[in-house]
Amino acid sequence: MAAQSCPSAPNTQSIIKFNHADIAPLGETRPLLENIHFELTPGSITGVLGPTGAGKSVLLETLLGETEVLGGSVEVDSADIAYCGQKVWLRNTSIRRNVIGNLPYDSEKFRRVIQACFLDDDLAWLPEGENYVVGANGANLSGGQRQRVAMARAAYAETTIVVLDDVFSSLDSVTAICILHQLCGTNGLFRQAGSTVLLATYLPQSRIVTDQLLFLDGKGTATLSTQIQDPAYTDYLVASLVPMNRNVPLVDEDKEQEIVRRSLEATAPGASLSNADLRRQGGFGLYGLFINPIGKIKFVLHALFVSFGSALEVFPGIYIRVWIQVDPESSVFFVGYVAVAMAACIVGFLEYWILHTKLSPRPSASLHDKIVTTTLGSTLAFYSATKTGSLLNLYSQDMILISRGLPGAYMKTIYASSNAVINTGIILSGATYLAIMLPLMFIILYFIQRYYLRTSRQMRHLDLEMKTPLYTFFEETAAGLTHIRAFAWEASNIESGLAALEESQKPFYTMVAIQAWLSLVLGLLTALIGALLVSITLLIRGSSSQPAVGLSFMGLLYLSQALESTITAFTTMETSSSALARIFMFERDTPQETKESEVQLPANWPSSGHIRLQNVFAYYSRDAEARPALQNLSLAVNPGERLGVAGRSGSGKTSLLLTLLGFLEFDGHIEIDGIDISYIAPDELRARFITITQDQVRFDTTIRMNMLPFSINEVKRTSVEDVEKATEKDRDLEQLLKDLHIWAPTVDKGGLDAMLDSVGYSKGQLQLLCIARAILRQRDTGSRIILVDEATSSVDAETERIVHRAMEENFVGCRILTIAHRQSGLDGVDRVIRLHQGALAAAEDTDSDSGDD
């Protein structure tokens, strides 16, 4: 199908040219956009519009080289590009470093950019101002702050081409419009820099500042038009734009969210996951966490078996001594020698096989289960105050130490120490008088291991800690690869990675040097023993036989290696025990939702969905200085009523939802169908509600599994009747996806068996998939209470109407509580309440039919 095209100003050479291009996402062979043909002139600003899933992001990513051009051509006259993606990417560094990127700091330009993106007030009240560290991917900032920092980075770069993909989705309309004019208006920063801008947005005011609009119709074609003021064309486009009717300055919202974040951090009990307080600890008392799941008797028997294997390895040398003394010419002794050697090999194999298949998996599984159970049972305050990296270290580095490092170190310690004892006995058998020197040797060994353990233990912990910045670098690079390539930061990013690698290797190098020192010292000690052995043999004639002396020297050769292996293995075991300490502290100190239900809930509760709140005060923190999130809130919701909750961020909307779900502590009474929820266990309470959130929850599996995560394992296909039921269920899933207009992308990928990532859903389409999951969950549970938090924030107006229609058809008779910032998100509700600072500010009835007008 030929695409329509309206050329830009003909008297100027184009900087971007799509020449009948067929475009597909990376790895795909079927084009999402076909025969795309248009040109953009330098310095022009183009708005990219279209329904959800039309391919706006794919079109913009084509300019960055992140898609497949299957036919035609795409010509970009400059590689100087700034990119601000739909998914915000920030490094875990200061706001200033995030804004300036790899460019030199220009205070005047930085000030202009900060003002244009409305960040100056934020910097005024944030701790440390522009040096405030944003956290992992901006975790310490609100959603609006993250988007504005990302836009500031694009503006500071002053590039030839600027690509902005849905950058106003987390901003209120007033702030979004002001930033839009500050950047793209007549005197905007992008105009002043002469940048060519492509802007994908649902913001209606984009028609005012753009020179032309590029409309994607959702069928693979694009139309470029400069007839923005044409009423007919305006009507054609308005369906793709979403009105935004909020009037609250965003900086107030961010202040409220920052206050909440700090209160959570202040009240989260300190389950410290730092290694600093563990560097000097041993770990003997913690080995029970490793031994108990195995069983003490089994553990001791395996340790004895390892010692027996160590003795078998040394025994051939002793056997040769006996052979030589008894009958050197006998071939029978040769057969015995081979048998002993083979037995040592078989026992060594069995030692490792038993350890890694029968014993070590048990403590690994047990400790991993402790981490998972503790994490899932922790409180909202703990989640908000604990850095993700700390939790990831528990699941990654610490579990690797426990599942791989600790078992191997334990076995090597037993094996090497047994070997050292046996070799010492062999040496003494050749020079009995050498036993007089044993106490001195043990004293020397004691001081050597004490010095080595004290130093190497700290270096090993430091080695683990210094790898954290390297892992952070890998994580940030993987998450922001598109941005890094767009800004042409590959070379500097590699330099940063090499610098992090260099720092991470310093403790490792020092550790290698310490181990070299240990080898030297133990080698000198062994040489001293050898000198004493020779001296005693020569000075005290007849004190030993020739075979015994030879065997003693053979034992002497292995003694140094055995001693070194014993000390290094024991140090590794001690280091691994710190992982046991961290897991022990995590389980001990992490606050848990341990409350048990005090009432027996009916199987169909809540059946009617009647909600009553009376004098409710809810708290993120019980601190005396903390303001309640909800203040003296009284509210009644009748069965079947659809309630809209409005108000600015921080006014208590989400706090109301969290309180109903049992995440916040509260005073007062909340009854649902006559049962006080304070008597219900939080997990059981949440399982009885259907919750649709703004953040998509997705699983790395098939479409079917994503739609039925709770009941997929209950679907059996062992009989003809089961197969018929499963087939009927699949038809229902397919029809639901068709009703939400997201079935088509799955057809060529395998339908319900297609992997979610391979389908290529847009952010808005993923939100629709989550809504489909909620509909199916409601059908399975029969719950009459639906909690909706900004469920349509990432979709266009037409898709939003489809969502409202689907919810009306599928949630008949349900009590729906809807939180929304956009007025269109409250279409179809029976009543709207407005909250201010956690209190009920206003309540008004609505005409539920007006939402379609």
Image: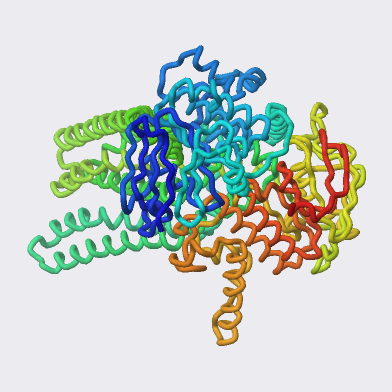
Q: Nearer the viewer, residue 166 or 627?
A: 166
**Residue 145 visible from this viewpoint:** yes
In the image, what residue occupies the spot 23% across and 63% down?
A: 340
Residue 696 is left or right of residue 101, and the answer is right
Identify the residue at the far left of this view.
329
> x%, y% of residue 821?
72, 41
In the image, what residue occupies the spot 61% across and 30% down?
A: 145
Residue 310 is left or right of residue 643, and the answer is left
**Coloration of the structure image:** rainbow
Q: How many numbered dots are placed on residues in this image? A: 0
Q: Which of 246 and 73 is in front in this view?
A: 73
Q: Can you tell which quarter of the image residue 456 is in?
A: top left
> x%, y% of residue 490?
34, 33
In the image, what residue occupies the spot 54% across and 83% down?
A: 718
Q: Nearer the viewer, residue 155 or 817?
A: 155
Instruction: Establish if 512 lies above or below 596.
Output: above
In the image, what residue occupies the spot 70% across and 32% down?
A: 257
Image quarter where the N terminus lies is bottom left
Identify the residue at the far top of this view.
108
Q: Nearer the viewer, residue 301 or 258?
A: 258
> x%, y% of residue 773?
63, 61
Instruction: Establish if 213 lies above or below 673.
Output: above
> x%, y% of residue 641?
84, 57
Residue 20 is left or right of residue 628, and the answer is left
**Residue 300 visible from this viewpoint:** no
Q: Can you tell which quarter of the image residue 553 is in?
A: top left
